[in-house]
Structures are given as structure tokens and as C-alpha cells.
Amino acid sequence: MEYDVIVVGGGHAGCEAASASAKMGKKTLMITININNIADMPCNPSIGGSAKGIVVREIDALGGQMGYCIDRTHLQIKMLNVKKGPGVRSLRAQGCKINYPKEMLSRLKKLKNLTIKEDTVKELIVNDKKVHGVLTEHGEKIYSKVVILTTGTYLNSDIMCGHEKHKGGPHGEKNSKYLSNFLKENGINIIRLKTGTPPRILKSSINFDEIKVENGDNKILTFSNFYKATYDIDKQIPCYLTYTNKNTHKIINDNLDKCALYSGMIKGIGPRYCPSIEDKVVKFNDKDRHQIFLEPERSDDIEYYVGGFSTTMPHSIQEKLLKTMDGLHDVIITKYGYAIEYDAIDPLQLKMNLENKVLENLFTAGQINGTSGYEEAAAQGLMAGINAVLKIDNKEPFILKRNEAYIGVLIDDLINKGITEPYRLLTSRAEFRLLLRHDNSMIRLTKYAEKYNLLNDYEKKKYHNILGEVEKLKNYLNNTYVTLKEVELFLKQNNSSNRNNKILLSNLIKRPEIDAKDLLRYKNQKYDDDVVEMVQTEIKYKGYIDKTINEVEKMLKLESKKIPNDIDYNKVSNIATEARQKLSKIRPLTIGQASRISGVNPADITMLLVYLKKEYNHD
């Protein structure tokens, strides 16, 4: 049995990798431990959030599946940071943990080049440092041209709660026992990481009168760039907000020796930006309370997720802690919180296309690369799937730059900076975030989806229609003058003035008090709301955008300076030892990439440029 691509794992990374490979025409096999856990959401069934919501839009613009699936299965959706600038606005949806995986599986089953198989991969078939397929626990050898590992938190994983510890994956299922050791034996560096999840509680045991309601937005919103929403605004299920208090904190401090985290049982490093409640209380002991979100997990509205309350306390302590909080005095726990410790690989051993440097034809994506979050995993899976096909076809890899996408920032950070803890994407990590907005993801990225045959005919048509609408609106606004008399009533209604008899509509929109949608309605012009939002943002923020583009051009100059593959960094004089070691290990392709490596300073870059000019006649 032989395939072009084998994807190991059926989580968010695996789904996008398999989808991309199959759409690009390659015979693809997805191997997963349990087909019922494809696109599983073992932690909070939410998609999006700060920065992450833009990543989902980017995945969708590139022909991925995540945005479409969450649009059709969410319980609530809202736009975050609406009072802030457009560079940090992003969507977040509370999903249904039952319907989202069903929707994803349904989409995957419709791909004609994809086969899904239940099994566990024990080893890779390796010959002369090249991967040629997989060996399953049942002894079956399956050959392929490339393998993509998307094993999530299942590699040699341990479940921990209190002083109890046992082997298993999320939900206490079977883990991957052997693959981690095989990778280690073949020269891949393994690191130990940790994540966790809070308890789930019964809705009927919550006193909602004591806590604050958090509703979805009263406006139709979508992650998809191509498809309209299908939900009823008025039928969104609310979330709720409560808080820990001094009693909660006292119980935690009195019982730290009983939790897995502080008893010394856990060795792996946890995510800084999603700490357990124990960590919050200990590290932020000046805080009298912490926010706790109660969020629905399913469309039947039976169970709620206790957001912000990840814990490794024993079951009896978890119950005591929850009952100290408003709304939860009579709470009934349906599933207790726990920590999961698992193996990951060192991302410094990856190329920019997510292929491993040690074993050729091996790609990795998702939490195995040291990231946290469904969105980061899906983004890597999509990129690994595309690049695996390009590898097979002997084509140039697809590498997104930092100015093109948050996905580019994510992968660039992993490969050049490595990790010391599970990596989470933040808006602050993107220096060009004003260019990487929610509203312009299609304009930025869908040209690549079209190039790599990741779109169906409807999506291609939609894309070109949007491009046409954008250009049409820009031309109209940049070439249409109006007189004071024509817009006098409109200006009065919007508390705006006009000192000139004539003014361009684009200049009028630059005024902070003027909304382009209102102005276009006043002028009886009909354009898609998403198109108007995109064009308006570019007009209102043109000065800032132009400044950012100038910074991008400086970066691209450094990216254009290639570093020869055969360079020996030991021969480069006067660079720091750390820089020499990092450059030798990562082997950056360009000066721009080298400049972003942790431990490589501007002085090291200067000496590297001097060496390249002398030895390779580089300018």
C-alpha cells in the first residue's frame, strides 16, 4: 500500500494538512487513533480570540477548513477589541464540541483523494535519513513520499491530577507510546511540555442570577471569507462571568502540596499565557480575585466549561474551590480538571517549510512543534500540507513572510527563536499587525490559495468578485467630488463641517466622525459591507499603513540577502559564541532570518555581512 502523503494524527493540524494535500491532488492517508476524535476540542471548544481569530481568517483565505466549520457550529460569536484599532480586532466564537468535529469529518469525507484509517503509528520507515512511510502498532507497513506528524498532546503523554498519574491522551484515551522514542533515536531533540484543562459543570447546578451575562454580538459575523453565516443572532447561547475570591485563594494556598503542579510531579513547562488557577494565585498574590468564564460546550446547553480555572488539584479540592464562587455554591462537576504532560520536538530543527532538518521527507505541525491552541495547530497543518505537496513536485516551498500573515509570524518565531514553553500567538508578536488585519485576509492571501488549487469554483468566483468590488469602490471614492450642498445634511447629521465647496469622498472618509457605510448609503451606492470596511480602513489609516510599508521594505531588503548553504560559521570572525552556535544550528536562509534569531545581535549581523562580502562577493 502506498500513498503520496501520510498524515499522522486527526486533530486540527492533521485535518488541515490532509485537506490541503488532498485538494492539491495527492493520494493522502490520515491515520488517527480514534476517528470519532477527529478535530476534537479537549479543552475549551472556542475558536479565535486575540490574534488567533485573524489566524482563522487567514486559514480560510488559504482554502482551509476551520473557519467554515466553526461558522456552522458555533453557539456564540463576537468581535474582540472593537474599541481599539483595526490591527488588533479579531473574532472569537464559542463552538459546540459535538457538532464542530462532525462538521469537519463530513467535510474531510467529501475529499476524493483522502482516506482515513484508525490505527497508531509506532515508527517511521527510515532509510539513509529519509522517511518513506510508517509502521503501525499492528505491524502494517504503509509507504509514502512524505509523512506529516500532527500528534498533538498524544506523544508519550501522562494525565495528572492531585498525586495521581497515568499514561493516556486527552479524555484519558490511548496515547502514542513508541513514536517519541523512535524520533529521539533518530537524532530529533525531544522536549517535555505541559498543558491542562478546567472542570466541566452541570448547567442546572449554576445560579445564573448571581453572575454577569456575556452575550454574543448583535450583528452577523463570519470567519469565512467566502460563505455567508447561517445562524440566528437571537438564538446565541450566552456565556457568564464570575470571580475567584479570598476564600478560593486560601484553599489553594493551603493545599498546594496536594496538586500535581506544585508537588513536583510535573516536569514539563506549561503555557505562560494560559496558567492554572494555582499558578495565578501563587504568582499574582497581590490580586484579590481572578476572572472565571462559564461557557457552554454543546448546543444542548447541558455542560459548561469553567474558563480560567485550569487545575491539577485533587477532585475533592476542585469541588471546594468552585463552591466558593458566586453562582457556583451548589455546583455539580461532570468532569474534573487535569494536566497533561507530553513530548514535543525542538522547532529549531525545522526548516521554514516545516520539514525536519534531520529526517528528510518528514514534516511536523501543531503541538508537536511546541505551540498551544487549535488555531496555531491548524495554521501549521495547512502550511505543512501545502509544502509536503510542493516537496513531492520538486517546487519551491511556500513560505509566508512576517508582513504577509500572522501565520508567517508564527512559523518564523518557531524556527528562529525556538521555544521554552508552549508558544501562543499574540498581536504583540506581529510588528506589522496594521497590515495583518481581520478585514483584508482574503486580499492578502487568497492569491496563494488559487495558485495552489485549494479553492473550488464558487470560492474562486467569490474571490475575483471581491477584488473587483474593492477596486471599483476605491476608484469611486478617489475620483468623486461632492459639493457642500450635496452633502450638507449628511455633514450636519454627523457633526462634521466643510470649509471647501468641493471635497473628494475619500478625503471626507478620512475624518474620524464619518463612517463610509453611512456616506455610501447617503449617496445611494451599494457595496458589500466587508468591502467597505476594508477600503475605509485603508483610507482612514493610510498614513500609518504607509509608514508600516516603509518598515516592511527595509525588512525585505534583508530578506533578499541570501546566505550560501555551504557557509562555515566557524570561519566568521568576531561574532559571539552564542550567535555562532545558533547560526550553525538553525542555518538561516537570509540575513533577515538571521537577524531574528534569539542570541544573534546587530553586531553579529554586521560581521556576517562583512564576511559574505569578502568571501562570496555579496553586496
Image (cartoon, helix red, strand yellow):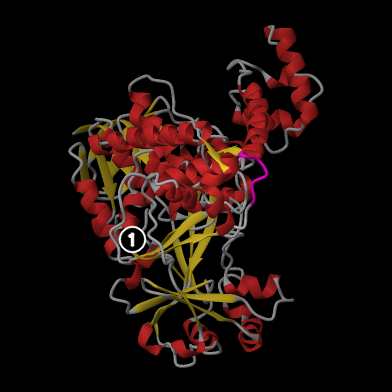
Q: Main secondary structure of the magenta part?
A: loop
At 61% across and 44% down in the image, what residue appears?
A: 510
Residue 358 on the magenta span? no
456 sits left or right of 361 in the view: left
Q: Position of residue 580 (x, y in %)?
A: 72, 28
Can you say which quadrant of the picture contains the N terminus? top left
Q: At label 1, which amino acid type do we have? A: Lys
76 sits left or right of 509 in the view: left
Q: Position of residue 69 (x, y in %)?
A: 31, 54
> Farthest top residue?
617
Can you say which quadrant of the picture contains the C terminus? top right
The boundaries of the magenta stretch are: 497-501
At 49% across and 49% down in the image, what residue appears?
A: 519
User: Compared with residue 576, is residue 115 higher up or lower down, i.e. above or below?
Assistant: below
- Asked whether residue 548 appears in the rendered view, the answer is yes
Q: Nearer the viewer, residue 229 or 315?
A: 229
Q: Which residue is mark 1?
A: 174
At 48% across and 43% down in the image, what residue appears?
A: 534
At 36% across and 36% down in the image, what residue appears?
A: 385
Q: Position of residue 267 (x, y in %)?
A: 58, 61
> Which of the 4 image quadrants contains residue 256?
bottom right
Q: Are there few (<14), some (14-19), or many (20+) residues within 10 Å of tag 1?
A: some
Q: Nearer the viewer, residue 275 or 479?
A: 479
